């Protein structure tokens, strides 16, 4: 049961938090690499629960 909590609530929140920081940092410093990595992490944070949880459950 703890594995589902990690993949459904904890990892997406952490990835989302760091992705927003990277997006803001990349836009303000005009570093496209940070912005692209931040956007990819944001999408990953949204998709991880739908990909991992069916495998775990």
Image: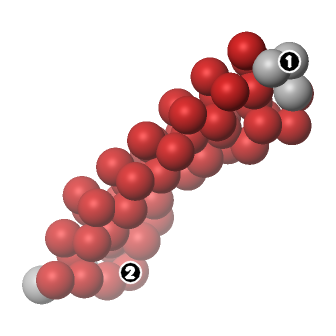
Q: Which mark is residue 22?
A: none
Please identify, in this view, whether the residue under mark 2 or under mark 1 is nearer the observer: 1
Question: CA separation, marks 2 and 1?
Answer: 39 Å
Question: Residue at label 1?
Answer: 30
Residue 55 to residue 30: above or below? below
Q: Which residue lies furthest to the left in this view?
A: 1
Residue 23 found in image quarter? top right
Answer few, some or many: residues within 10 Å of disc 2's Cα (few below 14, many 20 plus, some between 14 and 19): few
Q: Residue 40 is drawn in which quadrant? A: top right
SS of the residue at dot 1?
loop
How many neighbours does mark 1 have within 10 angstroms: few (below 14), some (14-19), or many (20 or more)? Answer: few
Mark toward the start of the polypeptide (2 vs 1)? 1
Residue 11 percent location from the top left of the image:
38, 62
Q: Where is residue 5 in the image (x, y as percent from the top left)?
A: 19, 70
User: Residue 55 — which label?
Assistant: 2
Residue at (74%, 17%) from the top-left corner? 27
What is the secondary structure assignment of the residue under circle 2? helix
Image quarter in which the C terminus is found: bottom left
Asked if 22 appears above or below 15 in the picture, the reply is above
Give the residue drawn at x 55%, y 34%.
Answer: 21
Vertical arrangement, residue 27 with respect to residue 50, above or below: above
The answer to whether mark 2 and mark 1 are in CB contact below 8 A is no
* Side of 34 relative to 55 (left or right): right
Q: Which residue is drawn at 87% across and 27% down?
A: 31
Q: On the rendered structure, is 45 left or right of 43?
A: left
| Left or right of 24 on screen, residue 7 | left
């Amino acid at each position: 049961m703890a594995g589902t909590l990690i993949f459904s609530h904890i990892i997406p929140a952490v990835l989302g938090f760091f992705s927003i920081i990277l997006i803001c940092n990349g836009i303000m410093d005009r570093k496209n690499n940070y912005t692209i990595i931040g956007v990819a992490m944001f999408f990953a944070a949204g998709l991880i629960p739908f990909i991992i949880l069916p495998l775990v459950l």
